[in-house]
Amino acid sequence: MTGLSVIKVGLYATIQDLGRVGYLGYGITTGGAVDAFALRCANRLVGNTDNHAGIEVVLNGITLVATCDLQLALCGAPVTLHVNDEQCFMNTLVVVTAGSTVTLGRAIKGTYSYLAVKGGVSTPLVLGSRSTVIREGLGGITGEALKAGDLLPAASSDQPPEIPHRQRHEPRQLPNKTSTQADTLQLRFLPGIHYDDVTQDCREDLCGQIFSISGSANRMAIPLNGSPVDTGMTKLWSEATCLGSIQIPPDGQPLVLMNDRQTMGGYPQVGVIIPPDRVRLSQARAGQRVRLEALSTAQAEQIVWLHEHYEETHLKALDSLGSPAP
């Protein structure tokens, strides 16, 4: 099998693409890259389409060996990248030869990094996606996190590299999702389906205090620690959830639902974090201070439109660096 052989996984790594679309009604969550923009950037740098599967690496890196000549790109949370003993840059195309050891170090800041390979990691499609959702045992390699000894099939480069480990382009400056640029991260949200049903005190407590990110944050949800928020609601039917939804369980500590969330939930949903702030939240680390802010629909639409335009401008700039892989 040609591609990448997993030698060592630091904390946690999975195969992810942009997610499993169209199955929420069957109770199957979307999954997919937590920082989709970072994966899209890495794919563009190697000439892939946006939805090619790559490796999502959490915090503590991964060590791989190339079993054929490959073209790689690494984006997302800043980490050290070495090919054998040579240090390489993130946010650029890196060419490696068969037998090379590729090592991602511990994240300098942020949480999620993405390694793309030309042609994509071609593990089997499951319901139209290669994304790994461990709770459901779907995608990746037998629905599990990567471990030493796993072999990841990938398309080889069209031509052998002229120079081993050569970086074919200068590193690109990409939008930074891993820096809060402030002591407190502002999380803007649209009021949710139960926002008008909770008490006024609940709304004031939700937006009037500073929370911190819990150390139990993962791909399912990011708990926020603070003074308990009392919704005043005692009975509630289970209802559909969505990415970025703010739930408040009985202990009063809000949860922000993420990619591997359950599709139904019985806790009050008071809001939905707008996409750019949700990604910044996911890239933040335990202990980061956050504050919630409610937006009007018009405000949210303007912020999201500007953010999407900003991202698309950067993605188009990457298109010139390679043609799409088959």
Image (cartoon, grey):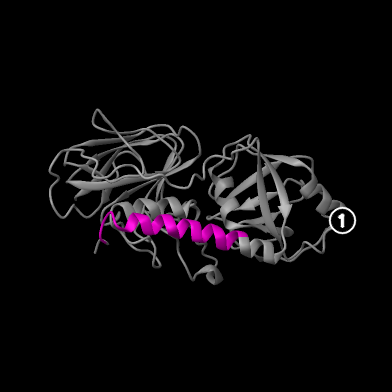
Q: Which residue is mark 1?
A: 200
Say whether residue 282 is left or right of residue 84: right
**Three-letter code, disc 1:** Gln
Most prominent secondary structure in the magenta stretch?
helix
In the rendered structure, which segment of residues is drawn in magenta? 303-323
Few, some or many C-alpha atoms within 10 Å of disc 1 (few <14, some 14-19, many ≥20)? few
Residue at image point 67% right, 46% down: 186
Secondary structure found at label 1: helix
Quick one: which residue is furthest to the top in this view?
85
Say whether residue 91 is left or right of residue 223: left
Name the one closer to the observer, 295 or 145.
295
Give percent across and percent down for residue 108: 46, 32
Residue at image point 21% right, 38% down: 165
Residue at image point 42% right, 32% down: 106
Give percent across and percent down for residue 234: 83, 58
Give percent across and percent down for residue 147: 36, 41
Say whether residue 211 is left or right of residue 144: right
Q: Does residue 283 show up?
A: yes
Give above or below for 276 relative to 263.
above
What quarter of the picture does the C terminus occupy? bottom left
Name the one closer to the observer, 84 or 175.
175
